[in-house]
Image (spheres, rainbow, N blue to C red):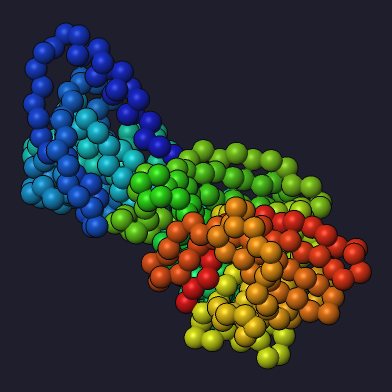
Amino acid sequence: MKVKIHSTILKINILFLVFLFISCGSDTSKKETPETNTDTTSKTEATTEKEDNNTYYVWVDNINVRKTPNTKGKVIGTYKPQEIKFTGTISENKDIIVLRSVVYDDYWLKVTTKGNKKGWVYGGAVKNEGDDIGNEIITDEQFDFIHFGKFDLTTWKNISIKNEEAGDAETQITTYHKDGKILEISKSEFGEYGYEYRYVLKDSKHNILKEREFYFMVDGGAYENRVMELIEIVKDYTNKVQYTRSQKTSKHFMQMNAKPLMVNGVWESVLLSTENKTESEVDKKTAFAKPLQVITTLNDLPDGFAVDDGCSCTFRTHPKDYGTMVFIGTTDDPPKAIAVIKIDGKYISLKSKKPENTDDKRGSVHKQYYNEIYDLKLTLTEEAKDNGGGTIYSGTMHLTSKDGTIDTNINTFGSCGC
C-alpha cells in the first residue's frame, strides 16, 4: 500500500491550456470545500478533452456523484467501487478533503456512471488503472502503515494504559503484547497547535525494531500566516533505513472533515547508522541545551512537586517538537512558584524569586529560579494566546552554577496555562 498525489491532474492542466487557445466557451458552476466545518465558494469549471484513458475506478467504499462540484451539491447517486467515465470537464480549483485519514488536495471531475448518470465526483477518490493511490481504512485497532507494518490489535493483549499531562499537552500511552513483541503507542494532543502519534515496536528484550512518528504541526504565528505541515518518519532498525515524507496544507486540521493520520507524499530514505539506534533524535535536538536534559515523564518528578488543577508552565528547546521539554513549573507568582529541571539524569527542584535588573528590551516577561547550586533565568516574549486562555512564549534560558562551571544560554519555546 502506497499513497501519492493523483497522477492525471498535471496532464489535465496542460490540455486545459491548449484548449483555451481553440475555444472561447466554458460553463460555470459552484465548487465546495470538505463536508464538515467548511465554507462553500464559487468556482469556475474548466473543460478539457483527455486523449488517453478516461476510465476511472472508485477506490473508496462509497462515492457520491453530485449535481455540482460541491459537497453540498445534490447527490444524484451513491456508488460502490466501480468504473466511471471521465467526460473531460474539471473544476477550476481544488478542494482539501481527508479520505481514509489521508489529506487530498484535488479537483472535482465530471463523470458518467454505468447507469448513464452524469455528475461530479471528487478527484482524490478515483484513479486510473495502474495509479498508485489509495489505502486501507485506518482505525485505532487496525492499521497498515508503509514501512512500519500491518497490525490488528484485536489479536494483541492490552497490558497497560497511562495518561500524562504537561501544560497544554495531553498524552496517552498504550502498550500491547503478542508473540514476544511489544508495541507502544503514544498519542499526544497539543490543542490547536497539533498532535503527535508515535509507534514503537520492540522485541522481548525491549530492543527497538521499528519506530513510526506522525506529526500535524501548526506554528504559533498569526492565524492568517500559519504554516501547517504533516510529517511522517519511520525508522526500520532491522534494515537500518529511515524513511521520511512531509506534506504542507493550507487548512487547519480542526477545519478538516476528518483527522489526518498519514502523509500524502513521496518517501525519502537514508541509512541509519548504529548510533541512531542508541542516540535518540530528542538527544540530538537538545544537545545544545546541555547540561539540561529532556523531561520524558511526569511520574518521576520529585516528591512534593505537583501541578495544581493541571496548570503549569512548560518550556522546550525545539519550536515544533514537544518531546524536548526541559522545564516544568507551577503558574504561581514568586516566591510560591517552583520548577523542575533535569541534569545528569537527576530531577532538580528550584525555588522562585522576582528577577532583578531585567532588560525589557530583550523580552516582556522575566522569571528566575534557583537552589543552592543552580540559577536559571528566563527572558520571554509573549507570542499568542491559546484556546484555553494560556500564553505562548519564545525566548531564552540562562543557566549558571554557583561554582562557575556552567554558564549557558538556551533558546526556548513554551507556554503557561491550564
From what the image shows, is residue 19 above or below residue 405? above
From what the image shows, is residue 134 above or below residue 206? above
Question: Measured from the top left, where is residue 36 in percent x and y?
Answer: 23, 57
Please indicate whether residue 248 sits to the left or right of residue 90 in the image.
Answer: right
| Res 206 quadrant in image | bottom right
- Which residue is painted at 83% across and 60% down in the image? 407
Name of the residue lying farthest toward the front: 357
Which of the pair 267/288 is nearer the observer? 288
Q: How many marks?
A: 0
Name of the residue lying farthest toward the bottom: 304
From what the image shows, is residue 387 above or below residue 352? above
- Which residue is painted at 17% across and 42% down in the image? 41
Which of the pair 225/274 is nearer the observer? 225
Please indicate whether residue 260 sits to the left or right of residue 204 in the image.
Answer: left
Please indicate whether residue 228 sits to the left or right of residue 129 in the image.
Answer: right
Question: Measured from the top left, where is residue 378 in percent x and y?
Answer: 66, 64
- Which residue is painted at 57% across and 72% down in the image? 313
Question: Measured from the top left, where is residue 155 in percent x and y?
Answer: 52, 75
| Res 166 quadrant in image | bottom right
Question: Measured from the top left, where is residue 64 in percent x and y?
Answer: 17, 49
| Res 11 quadrant in image | top left
